[in-house]
Image (cartoon, rainbow, N blue to C red):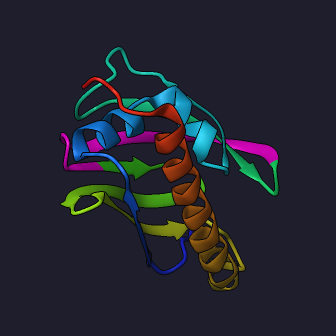
Amino acid sequence: MAYSRDMELVRDIVLPCPPEEAWAVLMDWERQADWMLDADSVRVVSDHREGVGVRLAVRTRIFGVPAFTEPMEVTGWEPPAELRIRHGGPVAGEGTWRLDPHDEGTRFTWIEQIRLAVPLVGELAARVYAPMMRVLMGRAMVGLRAHVIASGPRRV
């Protein structure tokens, strides 16, 4: 299958909680669809929920409609500082979530290094997809911040 060139997208936001609390919210796999607007559902399909090798099935929406299920696998696990996930399906590459202490809580940085499996119109599709992905990431981060605030302090 032909892929577009690699794209790197980076977004960050400050969450009003310590890194341990932010990590607990992020690792609540099934609740990720509450704040990640392009995810219809997230399911753990491996026999374990923590650490390298966790496999996920993420039902992804396009324009609000569930479109496909993307397989993902955790490739890096450093609580409460960094998570790396390999994408499968039409979006290939790796996503990284970094949590760094900040005066106001935690700086959450989301990095996507991805390419699209799009036959024939690869580069054109990638040029359209990248700005949409930046918007989706930004909206998800705002949703995550609201989710963290609404859920209040967690015991970790």
The residue sitting at 62% across, 37% down in the picture is: 34
Q: Residue 44 placed where, x, y %? A: 46, 24
Residue with the most extreme top position: 47
The residue sitting at 35% across, 14% down in the picture is: 47
Q: Residue 37 placed where, x, y %? A: 66, 50
> Horizontally, is 41 left or right of 12 in the view?
right
Span highlighted in magenta in the image: 65-83
Depth check: 129 or 78 in front? 78
**Is 25 placed above or below 136 here?**
above
**Quadrant of the image occupied by residue 78:** top left
Q: Is residue 71 within the magenta segment?
A: yes
The residue sitting at 49% across, 43% down in the picture is: 149
The residue sitting at 54% across, 30% down in the picture is: 31
Depth check: 151 or 114 in front? 151
Q: Residue 84 placed where, x, y %? A: 29, 50
Q: From where the camera sits, is residue 108 visible?
A: yes
